[in-house]
Amino acid sequence: MGRLPWPLLVPAVIGMAFLVLPLAGLLVRAPWSTLPSRLAGAQVLEALRLSLVTATIATALCLLLGVPLAWMLARVSFPGRRVVRALITVPLVLPPVVGGVALLLVLGRRGLVGQWLDAAFGVSLPFTTAGVVVAEAFVAMPFLVISVEGALRGADPRFEEAAATLGASRWTVFHRVTLPLVAPGVVAGAVLCWARALGEFGATITFAGNFPGRTQTMPLAVYLALETDPESAIVLSLVLLAVSVAILAALRDRWVTSP
């Protein structure tokens, strides 16, 4: 490989600095001397616990609904499949706050579905922990669906065809042949989904609010702490940064293709 031309090298270095320096700023300005005590604070631990619990439940919900959805998009031909795929990926580019407003209009007490849930079962999702899970699942599921669909399209269909010719039912083929074939894609999609759910902010604060111990996740705690205690905001940000780095390290084989 030749040397990178100067007209490309300079903006490349500037672009790298633009992305790296803000992260370095967190490390430089972090209150390392008081870090253990701040991490052990009740507010931090409560926000971390709630974030881990809701992100895990949201990921489980996404797996339950997203894997069959990805299989349908990859294996079933039906009219409007491209439109369905486009609609599923909308949350990827939709501003999260808009997603929160949309959830309120559908699942709020006067929403299209929410008013029925409230009247029939007394269930109200907005401003509850369950609402946090719904908001996180809404913005995170496309990551899982795209990853699993890509894995399904890359899998050799001859194994499934061979199982079918041997008399295996469609369900047996799916859970005994298809799922093991695409297991790495499912795991990668689930990890990305979990990480996206953990970092969700806009839809959560719009649909579920910011109530400590009930709906205040780590990103919301960062936002609140930034106004009153910037050092605590830095500590919380470091936790999320560490999680992000760990996720990238775990998925390095899927993102890095050259030494």
Image (cartoon, rainbow, N blue to C red):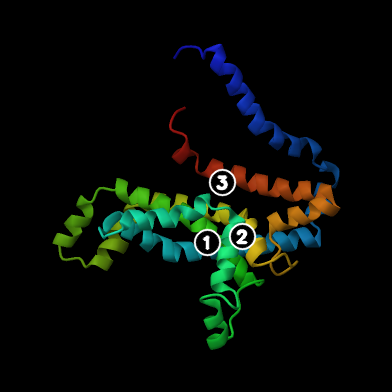
Q: In the orientation shown, which residue stands out farthest toward the bottom? A: 120
Which residue is painted at 22% across and 53% down in the image? 159
Q: Secondary structure at mark 2?
A: helix
| Residue beneath disc 1 | 138
Observer able to see residue 186: no
Compare residues 76 and 61 and report the one nearer the observer.
76
Tag 2: residue type?
Answer: Ala
How far across and how far down the image is residue 66, in percent? 42, 61
Mark toward the viewer: 1 or 3: 1
* Mark 3: few/some/many CA within 10 Å (<14, 14-19, 20+): some
Which residue is painted at 62% across and 27% down in the image? 16
Distance Cα–Cα, label 3 vs label 2:
22 Å
Observer able to see residue 160: yes
Compare residues 218 and 115 and report the one nearer the observer.
115
- Earlier in the chain: of badge 3 and badge 2, it is 2
How far across and how far down the image is residue 202, in percent? 64, 57
Would residue 176 appear left or right of 141 to someone viewing this image? Answer: left
Q: Is the Cβ of the residue at disc 1 closer than 8 Å to that at disc 2?
A: yes
Distance Cα–Cα, label 1 vs label 3:
20 Å
| Residue beneath disc 2 | 203
Task: Tell me which corner region of the image, top left, top right, bottom left or bottom right, holds residue 10.
Answer: top right
Q: In the orientation shown, which residue stands out farthest toward the left? A: 165
Distance Cα–Cα, label 1 vs label 2:
9 Å
Task: Tell me which corner region of the image, top left, top right, bottom left or bottom right, holds residue 15.
Answer: top right
How far across and how far down the image is residue 150, in percent? 36, 48
Which residue is painted at 21% across and 68% down in the image? 169
Classify the position of the N terminus by image quarter: top left
- Where is 130 relative to 236, above or below? below
Q: Secondary structure at mark 3?
A: helix
Tell me the number on the disc at residue 247: 3
